[in-house]
Amino acid sequence: MVIVEKSGLPVGLHVCSASPSEVTLVGSVLENRFTDEMPLRLIGDKAYDSDPLDEYLEEIGIEMISPHKINRVKPPTQDGRPLRRYKKRWQVERFNAWIQNFRKVVVRWERKIENYRGFALLACAIILAKRL
């Protein structure tokens, strides 16, 4: 799981198995970020529509922007104005296109998670070096 800034450059990375949901990994990614300052807002897809996640991020001063799930029972927490920022999510998807150039990271061939994390960090460093 990766956090990227608005231009698509990686800011944080966390590697784990594929079984846990993305909502439970947000705290780990925020702890493993490359920068000192916390992001002001996070933009996620419908999988991030979680009231406990919203409360956790609000406690640490981060605004969560994600559209609501269709089956949401509780009243909506997002209005139209912040959700307009969701349209700029294509900039985040640009990182996914860049990372596809690194074959070792696209498909996890490594048995040990430390090796895979090292390749993912190397790919992020190369992307940062090319873009900065």
Image (cartoon, rainbow, N blue to C red):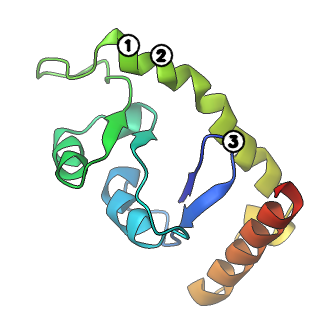
List the residue tagged with mark 2: 84
Q: Is residue 96 left or right of residue 85?
A: right
Residue toward you, 8 or 21: 8
Q: Is residue 59 left or right of residue 69?
A: left
What is the spatial separation of the Cα atoms under label 1 and label 2, in whole angstroms? Answer: 6 Å
Question: What kind of element bears circle 2?
Answer: helix
Q: Please state which amino acid type lies under the numbered disc 1.
A: Arg
Tell me whether circle 1 and circle 2 mark residues in contact (CB < 8 Å). yes
Q: Please state which amino acid type lies under the numbered disc 2.
A: Arg
* Residue 83 on image: x %, y %: 41, 19
* Residue 79 on image: x %, y %: 29, 14
* Residue 68 on image: x %, y %: 31, 23
Which quarter of the figure has residue 129? Answer: bottom right
Name the residue located 58 percent from the left edge and 84 percent from the top edge.
113
Disc 3 or 2, which lies upstream in sequence? 3
Tell me whether circle 3 and circle 2 mark residues in contact (CB < 8 Å). no
Name the residue located 82 percent from the left edge and 58 percent from the top edge.
132
Q: Residues within 10 Å of mark 3 (few under 14, many from 20)?
A: some
Residue toward you, 126 or 104: 126
Question: What kind of element bears circle 1?
Answer: helix
List the residue tagged with mark 3: 7
Question: What kind of element bears circle 3?
Answer: loop
Q: Is residue 71 left or right of residue 44?
A: left
Q: Please state which amino acid type lies under the numbered disc 3.
A: Ser
Residue 58: mark = none
Residue 81: mark = 1
